[in-house]
Amino acid sequence: MRCLNKFEESDQFVLATFGMPDIYGRLQIQDGRNFEDSKPLSTMEQALELLAKVSKKSPKATPVDDWPRIIECVKRGTLMSLTAETVDSRIFLKFDTASPFFGNYELRVPAEHRYERGEVYNVTPIDEEGLLRFKYAMLSPFPFRYVVKTTASDRQGTQKFWLIGISSFVEAPIQS
């Protein structure tokens, strides 16, 4: 599998041709050991989740304004390629919604001289019912929502969970 280190030239062409909005969505990366899905809910979170299930409305969640912004997002068939950034880091992620074990990522933090890459281990779309869970409620404003599990190429095989909310993307033709 080829390592993802930047968008394909054709993806850049699609973005340049059709223009791009300021932001395509948001993402958050959580360490596998600290991923909230593995932690028990607090009493308050349990109550909010129960209320959400009864009312069929997502519980009020924390805002995602401080999450890295997705600044490039191209969909080619079922393959998603995205770039996100913060003030001090740049993130590249490629995953396939139809083949949950395909994809890779790169995380660059120049100020720390940190460069990390790894492979996608699993992709899970979050449906409307999933939004009733307190742990995913913050993704409710986004029409396209995923939890992506990755494994780093380091010796420990560090796992990360990515909460991804996509508001829009550029659709590119499938290359043969």
Image (cartoon, helix red, strand yellow):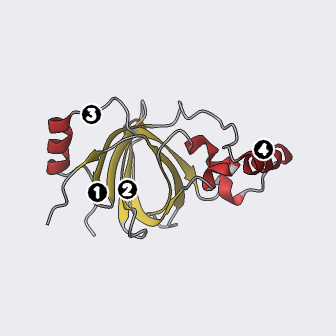
Residue tagged 2: 105
Q: Is residue 19 above or below residue 104?
A: above
As rendered, which of 102 and 54 lies closer to the eye? 54
- Please state the total of marks drawn on the protein image: 4
- Per the image, label 1 sits on a secondary structure element best described as loop
- Per the image, label 4 sits on a secondary structure element best described as helix
Q: CA distance from mark 1 to mark 2?
A: 6 Å
Dot 2 amino acid type: Tyr
Can you tell which mark lies on residue 48?
Answer: 4
Tell which tag, 1 or 3, sits nearer the viewer: 3
Mark 1 is surrounded, within 10 Å at the Cα level, by few (under 14), some (14 to 19) or many (20 or more) other residues, namely some
Confirm or deny contact between disc 4 and disc 3 (CB under 8 A). Answer: no
As rendered, which of 117 and 154 lies closer to the eye? 117
Of mark 2 and mark 3, the one earlier in the sequence is 3
Q: CA distance from mark 4 to mark 1?
A: 39 Å
Mark 2 is surrounded, within 10 Å at the Cα level, by few (under 14), some (14 to 19) or many (20 or more) other residues, namely many
Residue tagged 3: 20
Residue tagged 1: 4
Tell which tag, 4 or 1, sits nearer the viewer: 4
Confirm or deny contact between disc 1 and disc 2 (CB under 8 A). Answer: yes
Q: CA distance from mark 2 to mark 3?
A: 22 Å
Identify the residue at horizontal 16%, vertical 61% (top origin). 175
Of mark 2 and mark 4, the one earlier in the sequence is 4
